[in-house]
Image (tube, grey):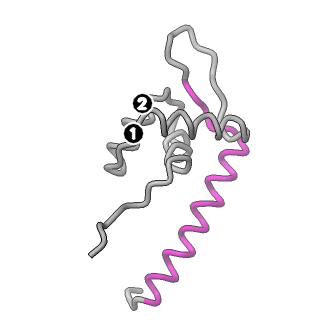
Amino acid sequence: MPKKSKFSEPSLLILISLAEKNRHGYAIMEDIEESYNIKIGPGTLYGAISRLEKWGYIRVLTSEEHKKPYKLTEEGQQYVTEQIKEMQKVTNLGLKRLGLV
């Protein structure tokens, strides 16, 4: 029997974390682990952050500290909203087909 796995798309989880408030990298990792019980490593996190920044979905805020806080942009807000709505459609159809709703 295959191992059960949870949804774990790092980019989407990062955007959802930043939808709540601005966070630096380590705080994003902690939030994802606490919220979803999914551990992502620094390489995965910062690779995804780099892509999200390049695509204009997040940006770095200026800070006096060593840690760089990230902020969700308007484009990022629109993208994450669309993705969640799409997942909701898939989930609703799946539940319906299973006879659970």
The crowding category of the residue bearing disc 2, from other C-alpha atoms within 10 Å (few below 14, some 14 to 19, many at least 20), is some
The crowding category of the residue bearing disc 1, from other C-alpha atoms within 10 Å (few below 14, some 14 to 19, many at least 20), is many
Picture quadrant where residue 49 is located: top right
Q: Is residue 5 above or below residue 73?
A: below
Q: Which residues are magenta?
A: 69-97
- Which residue position is annotated with label 1? 31
Tell me if residue 86 is in the magenta stretch: yes
Identify the amino acid type marked 1: Asp
Dot 1: what SS?
helix
In-front residue for pair 49/32:
49
Picture quadrant where residue 82 is located: bottom right
- Which residue position is annotated with label 2? 27
Residue 70 picture location, percent across and down: 58, 29
Residue 86 picture location, percent across and down: 61, 68
In-front residue for pair 77/27:
27
The quadrant of the image that shows the N terminus is bottom left
